[in-house]
Image: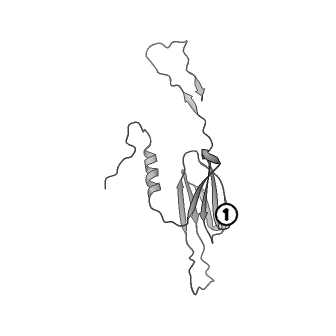
Amino acid sequence: MTRVMQFNSPFLLGFDGLERLLERAAKASDGYPPYNVEQLGGEKGEALRITLAVAGFSRDELSVTVEENQLVIRGRQLEDEERTYLHRGIAARQFQRSFVLADGMEVKGARLENGLLMIDLERPEPSRTVRTIEIESSEPANPSRRVTRDAV
């Protein structure tokens, strides 16, 4: 099978990592646990909340970590060896759910409430700057022209 390069334009320099992220995000994953992603804070999209349905999991059986721009949520229920089940319709199930985070996204916190794990994320407004790059020449520089950095 031939791999199609989406970012092979000469104008998209340094985006090969983004292509790998898209491939990772597109891989089919199991639908457990179900989740919602909601936008908070108006139209700007400055804040997000991911809510996972984790009924039956205690706080000690869940972990939320950030690993190289990936938010990873893991759940592992411990088996109770002292119980004998006549019917077991509710299985102790492990899961791992990952979300790729854009550069600058910060996890602000997580809380477990009524079987829902809510994780709040925020993207601070980036500072926009314009930088002028000096062009070097073999000719002597004109001292009356100076290069400055302007903030937008």
Residue 55: image x %, image y %? 62, 70
Residue 131, relative to residue 74: is it above or below? above
Give the quadrant of the N terminus.
bottom left
Q: How is the image coloured?
A: one colour
Question: Quarter of the image holding residue 86?
Answer: bottom right
Task: List x then y, in percent, for residue 93.
Answer: 55, 72
Please tell me how crowded label 1 is: few (under 14), some (14-19), or many (20+) other residues with Cα within 10 Å.
some
Tell me: 10 left or right of 78: left
Q: Name the image quarter holding the C terminus.
A: top right
Question: The residue under label 1 is which amino acid type?
Answer: Leu
Quarter of the figure with residue 37: bottom right
- Judge whether 97 appears above or below 100 on screen: below
Q: Above or below — where is 128 with respect to 99? A: above
Q: Nearer the viewer, residue 59 or 34?
A: 34
In the rendered structure, the answer to whether residue 133 lies left or right of residue 56 reads left
Q: How many marks?
A: 1
Q: Determine the residue positioned at 46% across, 51% down.
A: 21
Q: Residue furthest front?
A: 43
| Residue 10 at x, y percent in the picture | 38, 37
Percent x, y of residue 123? 61, 46
Name the element at disc 1: strand
Q: Which residue is mark 1?
A: 112
Residue shown at the point (55%, 29%) measured from the top left: 130
Q: Quadrant of residue 7?
A: top left
Tell me the residue at 66%/66% (across/down).
Answer: 59
Residue in front for this viewpoint, 65 or 46: 46
Residue in view at x 61 percent, y 67 percent: 54
Residue at the outermost bottom position: 86
For residue 53, side relative to residue 140 (left or right): right
